[in-house]
Amino acid sequence: MKVNAIPLKKYIAISAILIVLIMTVLDVTVVNVAIPVLAVEFGISDSLSVWIVTIYELIITMLILPLSSLGDMYSYRRTFLTGVVIFTLSSALCAASQNFSMILIARALQGIGAACVMSVNIALTRLIYPKEILGRGLALNGMVIASATAAGPTIAGALLSIASWHWLFLINIPLGIVAWIVGRKHLPQNTVSKSTKSYDWIGAFENAAMFGLLFLALGSYKAKDDELRLILMLAICIIIGYFYVRREMHRSEPMLPVDLFRIRLYSLSIATSVCSFIAQMLAMVSMPFILMNSYGFSSITTGLLMTPWPVATMICSPLAARFVERHNAGKTAAVGMAVFAIGLLLLIFIPLTEVTGLNIAWRMAICGIGYGIFQTPNNIVMVSSTPIHRSGGAGGMQSTARLVGQTLGATLVTIIFVITSGTTYTMVHHCLSIAIVFALIAGIFSLSRS
């Protein structure tokens, strides 16, 4: 087999993973757009309607590591296909929902299905691609996720303009059926442990409780809920987390991959990933405020001005994957973070007399180029530095790092807006400045892997 090619059968297997990734990513972005419509449909307040999005993301965060551990012990393929079935059936249940409680339960089930898929998609990609071109597989995953993220609002708007909100969920059913058929026939089986050890149900509960309480506490802060409840949730989270980590340190293949953190390359890559996603969310969440409130762009124009970022990331990721097949991945990722920081700096220092759509768009594109250069090399180092039989745990932790970084970044925007006095222009510039700091920290971490 040539180094730059893989058999057609494996490309077909990859298509099953990509189809489901599109479904799970789109389900966040399209429902975000449809929230006002769903609030009216079910007769609920805006604050309650947000739970239709929150419950999905919360369940994913709580279950990724327990399900990746399940994949390591039994089968990545079986975990993936189970997730496809759950996600497809729960999509039908979402479309059939008659009230708020019903759609909330259906969305929670969708979260379980999505967590099954996200917990093992990197492990399956590692099994499908030869080591020499693993980066291309990871880049393709990243490109598909970026494309789905960028296209989500447009797809949602187009569907809602010609059909009812039910079709936002019904569209998943044929895609899910195709993905299950293709996956069942073509996805590879992984070699599983022959030991008779049982699944760590206590660890699964502690993991779900720890991450669930953490994300609920952060969400509670953003919603400016009762401070006593916030402190109580954080305190319980810390206590559970202490006993969870302590327990996992004595297991041979822990659910929380503390054994993998002993691998320097892996631990540095996780730290790099968290910092990079914090920086990304600080910028992406805060920028619409300055575009609309300070520069006077409409909501539609603001959406268009944000688009060059994911599009540039989508284009650069596969190019970076090919580049690091012959060059150092750590240095390449560090260069990406440096370019990303330069893009953020250009957004801060754009002259007020030169605030035009074009001048903002090309600066956004530079941010996206930097992130595209960074993302794939960082993922390559993160995945390839771990043993093949721990691919589930490594991939699950990678997804968890992304979710933690994104949530912390969004929460930091709220904190900065609360404690900073001044105009929206000033507050957003503080967010971008802190994003640059996190990007540079990520770059330093990445460079230290060289």
Image (cartoon, rainbow, N blue to C red):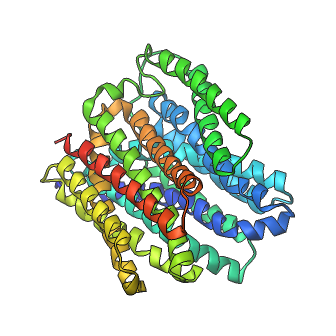
Using the rendered view, name the quadrant where residue 206 is placed.
top right
Residue 299, given in percent of the width and then of the height, sits at: 58, 79
Q: Residue at x 68, y 48 (%)?
A: 55
Question: Is 159 on the left-hand or right-hand side of 372?
Answer: right
Specify the farthest residue to the front: 421
Residue 59, given in percent of the width and then of the height, sits at: 63, 43
Residue 185, given in percent of the width and then of the height, sits at: 47, 50
Q: Is residue 28 above or below residue 411?
A: below
The total number of labels drawn is 0
Residue 70, given in percent of the width and then of the height, sits at: 52, 31
Q: Residue at x 33, y 44 (%)?
A: 272
Question: Is 49 on the left-hand or right-hand side of 410?
Answer: right
Q: Is residue 179 above or below residue 265?
A: below
Nearest the viewer among 156 and 418 is 418
Q: Is residue 85 above or below residue 78?
A: below
Location of the C terminus (image quadrant): top left
Specify the farthest residue to the left: 326
Q: Residue at x 58, y 35 (%)?
A: 211
Nearest the viewer among 388 and 98 is 98
Question: Is 26 on the left-hand or right-hand side of 140?
Answer: right
